[in-house]
Amino acid sequence: MAALFILISMIIGYWVIAKHRKGSGELAKEVSSTPAPFKEEPIPDPASFPIPADFSPSRKKTAEEAVQLHTQALDAWFNAGDLENFQKLAIEALRRYQQADWISPATNHLHAEILKVRLASNDYQTVLRECRKWLERFPDSLAHLEILGKAEYLTGRYADAASHLEAYAAKRPQSLVTQRQLAEVYAAIGMKEKGLAAVDRSLAMIGFPGSGFWSHPEAETTLWKALKVTHRFYEYERLEKLASVLYERSKDKQEPDLLMALGVAKRFRGDLEGAEYFLRRFLKAEKPGSPNLEPVRLELSIALSKRGQFVEALQEITLLLEANPYSSKAYFQLGQCLVRLNQKAKAEAMHFLSRALAPSDREFRREEADRGAGRTAFALRARAKGFSLRGQFREGEEVLRDQKYRDDPSVQVFLTEYLFQHLRVQEGRRVLRELEAKLGAAHADVRGWSAETLRLEGEPGKAVSIWMDLCREPSRLPIWGLRLGRTLLEELGRPEEAARWFDAILQAGPDTTIRILRGRALFEAGDYERALNILETVPPQEDEWEEEAGAVWLARARVRLGKGRETAGRDLEALGERFKHLAAYHLARAELLEAGNQPADSFRQEASRIAALEKKFFDARARIASAGGSDAAPLLLDGARIRIDIGDRAGAIRLARLAAAAAPKSVTPWKILGDWLNRPEELFFQAEALRQAAALDPTSKPALKTEDLISKLLQKD
Amino acid sequence: MPIRMLFCLLLLFTAGCEKKPAGGGYPFDGASSSASATAVTVRFIDVTEKSGVKFHTVCGGKEKDYVLEVNGCGVVLLDYDNDGKLDIFLVNGSKLPPPYGEGPGSPPPSDALFRNLGGMSFENVTQTAGLTESAWGCGAAAGDYDNDGDPDIFVTNYGPDCLWQNHGNGTFTDVTAQAGVGDPGWGSSCAFLDYDRDGFLDLFIVNYVEFNPANVKRRGTDPTCQYKGQPILCGPVGLPTAPCTLYRNRGNGTFEEVSARSGIRAVKPSYGLGVTVIDFDDDGWLDIYVANDTLPNLLFRNKGDGTFEEVGMSSGVALNDHALAQAGMGTDAVFLREGAREDLFVVNYEDDNNTFYRNDGNGFFTEITSAIGLAEPCFKHLGWGTFFFDPDLDGKLDLFIAQGHVVPQADQIPSSPGWKQFNKLFLNDGAGRFIDISSRAGPGLEVKKSSRGAACGDLDGDGDLDIVVNEIDDEATVLENAGSPKNHWVAVRPLGTASNRDGIGAVVIVRAGGKEQKRRVRSGSSYASQSELTARFGLGEARKVDELRVRWPTGKEERYPPPPIDQKVEVVEGKGSIP
């Protein structure tokens, strides 16, 4: 009896439920785990807001025209999709509203819609300006809060974006779009807890990880955003979960971003076999030239390396370095593989190269930090410097030429600086002229860089006069003082003045480069005692000591004063080949020998030869500075050949690279680089040069094949 | 029954059958499913007040205008009076004189020694011990350098370091000058070790930066000295680096400085902060690992002839997988896996992982931080003191990290967890992963300060490991291990005869319950600190020790009778049998 009762109850129960589910759907909604999507701000009907009764007839007429134009504008956009017409009508309607001095909720919405269109066409400055003005009058306008937050995010003002989007989200907690935007903003600033919390809220809004979340219309968009933010915060466990969900859903299981996310997450979580599987599939699926190929190949090589498959890891690294021979991380991994394969000498060379390229990594990290702090111009400058340190001069220039920042004077100043540093003087002049038009000829940056133009074009005397004037203002000393002092010292032969300026800079704070230069200036001015005192206090392990050849000047000072000649001799011997391109080095050797009454003619002759070549290079540089565009390329190569004659191999290679950047279609710079880059650690640079040359001129030396590169690497030391 | 009521009942029935979302209804509960399933018996409670350890660390001014003012100080646990109870030595800093700071005040801050009275109660005996001083201290280590039976103390300072000789009667004397160990640099961490296996403890000092406030811009006066938009102190980048120092013990109470001769100074100086002693290649000669700030870490391989070669890069412990030099602070070495060699662990800066390097046994290491669960939980935090230990005595080594930001301006940075941070406790799940149990390990892990040095030892004599943390600009913290139920344990204190008397460098091997565990008796490690020198083993469910061996620093290995459980034993070199 009881069993029968239960059975009947169940049958009735199922019938009731089925009826309700089939019928109204309300019950289904209640038991569904997927929340209904939140509708963003509804579009108000302009005609639904009555014109105030106390308007004068003319004012009422203007208001009516406003409403009519407004209605037509909305129709143009939402029904006809005619954005251009919408803008025209909308602006006209807004003008009428302003004339009638009537702001209704509909006006608020119209104004916001206009700004949305502006935002979509990247007119960020207008959007920022107009939004802020509007919010001063109408601080409760949620639409404007939202748009302002978006615009701030897109222009790198992340902290402001967060605060406005948070204000919007507080009033509209069910706005899924805003939670996604917040997650992204927090990711940009690096606010991990808030970022992940926003991700969690957005996922909860689509009902994830419930059973029906895929039915939410924004499920996919939200999951992808969650994936991106989670990846940003290195949360690999979460990343793997999200990526798996999306992967299961994907039709062909070939979506590169998912393959990459799964592969990377598994790599970090120690599932190396799984990592290899997905990362290899990504490399097959992804289109050539994609910026993700390199980091994925690096992760694959790390995964292989961790499994002890060093040869396979080396093969992947080879492919990576063929595509980008400037990767500090790749050289490090290559070194790790080589050392495990018992190729210690090559490993050491690759590790050394990795460290040499690492400053560029530091610049890229600095860029990230500056960007997060809203210092966009500094971020771009750091990024450009990062490329430059790798010899990727064109890429660095492109960063600073980003159209988004063409109206930002700080970015243009940094672009000027970059162009001059890379001897693109005529291009730098053009940018300087635009700056002058914006900031005025008297602006310190304009004057300072104009002086640099003069110096590079062979008029250092005029340049120092301008800098001296600028440096009367103490705050400008650190910026222009170094150029001033160095020019006085190295180009005008006025060491006493140089020493005084270096001293002035040091009053503002310590600086290793300036200390060494001051020591050098004092030496050249004949004040050997003070020179020695200063140079002896500079730690020889500092990078600047090497960059400024501090050891050479210290040795010279010691010899001149007869203090520590033996030490000086040993130090000079220990320098090896490093400073043989400096006249000062040969003079130091000569002076040391002469102090011991030994002949030093060969060193004196070498010093003279180098000095003469430096003069020749000075003239060559002036010619380079006067040329522009690809015309500078042959002159840069002339300069490079002079540097080779001097013995400055690094300087020569730099100039040859600049020539290649100045004339991308010219084969000569690449051919020259292919010949010069012949050291073991330069294998991939050489490969790049040969490849570029072969692409431009098939009759050039053939490019190195991947197999050749691998076998060179695996050849016993 | 009315049909409506039946319908409601059935409705309730079916509604109750609706499939619940996995994981509790919220997308990510902030922990993996395995983490939430892990049973936690560890419980730490803050007993600072009850303990009588009243110690405020002074380290510069409140706003930290100079880099000297941020690194804080360390702590050493030692039994200075050989009464069987672990005492506490806390290092103190100072303040810069005008115009750079407000001066140390009167009386100036001093390091302090707290004598263990038993029952987690301590008394300050600094004055009677003769340890009152006014130097700007940073790190410390304890070791019986003269092999006379009582531990001496070495303190690194900003300025000349200091060696305190223990007279065995509760008093100490500053013998720095006679011993010849007054390294004038800014010392951070240090360690005693017998690198040449002559039976006498040598001394290794990590120096940080060559710092002179007259040559460094004050916070806020150099626009390039900023962190995420906040003006902060300048350094260490941009300031002169500092070399490490190695002193060789002559065996007659004096040391000779052998930094250059030993090859320690053949490498470019760095910004050294942490040190741990390890024998990574298991050749019987102690090697030295140095954690550097923003520069590659260093691994000095002992060649066995009095010299070292630096092999950090080639062995894989200098950088992380992405070739980045991290900001290493504290470090520890550990025998984590049965039968394997010592691994290395370094704690790093905010927005970066800590790094665990697994020893592959062939001279190389592999970074596996994320794979073992130690990356993400600490990514936003900043670690200092750290050590592997077994607080729940289950035979698996767990991990403690003392955390706190470098600069108080972190409180103004939205993306930063701030100046004061919670410390972290990770449980070893025995399956190759560490689980963050910080929020479940008792109120002791709810202490939020800017922590620096940290050390562990059995302060209350109940067999498990307690913790002491040196907190910058704050009161030191004493955490009692109050977890239950307790597993069985054994503690071994090796006493050298041919080796240094403390047995520093010895490896103690215990086999119980079918498992073998190893501990190295280590001076230094963590950050600027030193834990107890007793090798302590949790036995889990095992009820007896099957085997006890000691590999002495001089190379000899001996077997000893298995000790009784739940007791501390001393084993003397030469009194065992050769295995």
Image (spheres, rainbow, N blue to C red):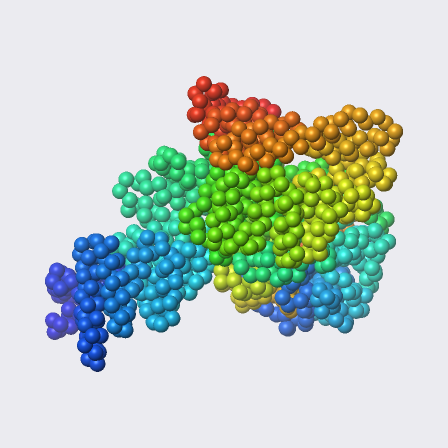
At 48% across and 38% down in the image, what residue appears? A394
Residue A568 horizontal side relative to residue A653, left or right: right
Which image quadrant for residue A283? top left
Residue A539 visible to an observer of this rendering:
no
Q: Residue furthest right?
A: A597
Q: Residue furthest top?
A: A699
Q: Please provide percent x and percent y for residue B25.
A: 33, 61
Note whether B286 is above or below A349 in the view shown: below
Q: Please provide percent x and percent y for residue A644.
A: 63, 27
For the residue pair A32 and A649, the one nearer the viewer reads as A649
Q: Quarter holding the C terminus of chain A?
A: top right
Residue B75 visible to an observer of this rendering:
yes
Residue B14 horizontal side relative to residue A428, left or right: left
For the residue pair B198 and A688, the one nearer the viewer reads as A688
At 55% across and 30% down in the image, what residue appears? A635
Note whether A448 is above or below B83 in the view shown: above
